Image (cartoon, rainbow, N blue to C red):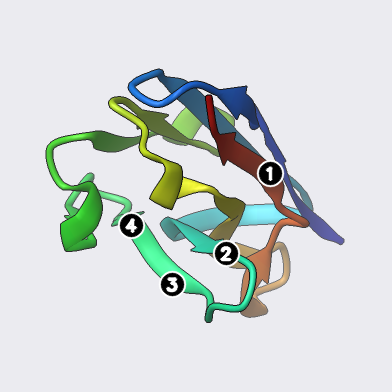
Amino acid sequence: QVQLVESGGGLVQPGGSLRLSCVASGSIFRVYDMGWYRQAPGKQRELVASITSNDTTKYTDSVKGRFTIYRNNAENTVYLQMNSLKPDDTAVYYCNADIIRLYGQQDWYWGKGTQVTVSS
């Protein structure tokens, strides 16, 4: 079994900051790409940021310069530092990871999500 568990969401005022964390646990051999997606009410889930196992990062245009994705490979953890938050960033944020399990099976896994609400 493999689990991704997110934490760090909450309510923040516009201009504020939050840091999301996602820990992968279970029968893991190796974690490759990791990423953060978000889904706002009535909208499709979108990729926010991704990071490869050698720390190459990508961001959607709307968060460039405000969000930073980074990871700790020893702890199978990925983070999303979110600064200068805007009401449009309000969404459920999901963690996603490409994982090879013990005994070789490789799959993409999702966390259950953490709510981020930006409002005054």
Observer-side mark, 3 or 2, equals 2
Label 4 to label 1: alpha-carbon separation: 19 Å
The residue singled out by tag 4 in the image is 50
Q: Amino acid at mark 4?
A: Ser
Above or below — where is 65 with respect to 51? above
Point out the tag, 2 or 4, that comes first from the N-terminus.
Answer: 2
| Residue 116 x %, y % | 60, 40
The residue singled out by tag 1 in the image is 115
57 left or right of 86?
left
Q: Amino acid at mark 2?
A: Ala
Quadrant of the frame with the N terminus: bottom right
Q: Residue at x 64, y 68 (%)?
A: 41
Do tag 4 and tag 1 residues touch (Cβ < 8 Å)?
A: no
Observer-side mark, 4 or 1, equals 1
| Residue 99 x %, y % | 57, 64
- Could you say which is closer to the camera, residue 35 or residue 17? 17
- Could you say which is closer to the camera, residue 39 or residue 31? 39
| Residue 111 x %, y % | 71, 56
Quarter of the image holding residue 80? top left
Other-residue count near label 2 (Cα within 10 Å), few / some / many at <14 / 14–19 / ≥20 = some
Q: Residue at x 41, y 51 (%)?
A: 88
Label 3 to label 1: alpha-carbon separation: 15 Å
Other-residue count near label 1 (Cα within 10 Å), few / some / many at <14 / 14–19 / ≥20 = some
Q: Secondary structure at mark 4?
A: strand
Above or below — where is 81 with respect to 25? above
Q: Secondary structure at mark 2?
A: loop
The residue singled out by tag 3 in the image is 46
Label 3 to label 4: alpha-carbon separation: 11 Å
